[in-house]
Image: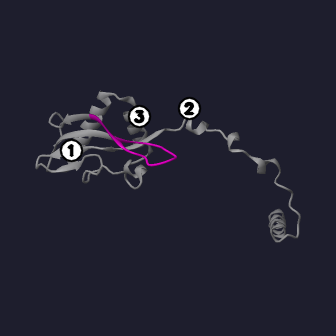
Amino acid sequence: MVGLLTLALVWNAAALGYVAVPDSGPAADASPADNSWDMFAPEPLETDGWYVVPGELESGERIDAFRGSAVEWDRPENVSRIYPDSRWRKYLVDLWRAEDADLTRGFAEYLCWRWNADNDDELTRVEVHYVEQPTRLDGPEPTRRVELGRYSCSVVDSGR
């Protein structure tokens, strides 16, 4: 307790200029080149993006089967919020990178099953798209729609 009281007194005395504070030393001369980007190894992503999964219902209405809302191609205000959690984000980033038709088909089948299990107006087909947006430090960041596949929901049992 005495140590904490002493520390608080010295800290406040230094803040008021009653106690000399040593120079910050070599840390003040840090260069950005001295920093490591290991966290982003082997290199940071050069492209960001999000999924848009237009689906057609039996009624003819179109919805985004992933978000459960109207189809919207524009960048979401907060892309990280479209993923239910970090595992979903990891799975969907891997899905985009893998370019594996079986993985994409499994994702589409899951979305069909999920929608049809909870809704009377059943989902009949979906298109899985990834909207790519390159990360640029100078200038606008254009987007490009990449179609990963088109799938029928008729082969998916809704579980009813």
Which amino acid, by three-letter code, is at mark 1?
Gly
Asked if the residues shown at circle 3 and circle 2 are in contact, with their CB atoms under 8 angstroms apart, the answer is no
Asked if the residues shown at circle 2 and circle 1 are in contact, with their CB atoms under 8 angstroms apart, the answer is no
Q: Nearer the viewer, mark 3 or mark 2?
A: 2
Q: Using the image as rendered, state which of residue 154 and residue 45 is in the foreground.
A: 45
Res. 102 image quadrant: top left
Q: Quadrant of the C terminus?
A: top left
- Is residue 139 found inside the magenta-colored segment of the image? yes
Res. 100 image quadrant: top left
Dot 2 or dot 1, earlier in sequence? 2
Query: In x, y percent, where is residue 62?
Result: 18, 49
Q: Is residue 32 left or right of residue 152?
A: right
Dot 3 or dot 2, earlier in sequence? 2
Which amino acid, by three-letter code, is at mark 2?
Pro
Residue furthest out toward the front: 139
Crowding near pointer 3: few (<14 within 10 Å), some, many (20+)? few
Crowding near pointer 1: few (<14 within 10 Å), some, many (20+)? many
Residue behind mark 1? 55
The residue depicted at 10 percent of the width and 50 percent of the height is 59
CA separation in Å, label 3 and label 2: 16 Å
Which element is circle 1 on? strand
Which element is circle 3 on? helix
- Is residue 115 found inside the magenta-colored segment of the image? no
Which element is circle 2 on? loop
The residue depicted at 49 percent of the width and 44 percent of the height is 136
Dot 3 or dot 1, earlier in sequence? 1
Q: Is residue 35 left or right of residue 158?
A: right
Query: In x, y percent, where is residue 69?
Result: 26, 53
The residue depicted at 27 percent of the width and 39 percent of the height is 128
**Stretch in magenta:** 131-148
Residue behind mark 2? 42
Residue behind mark 3? 94
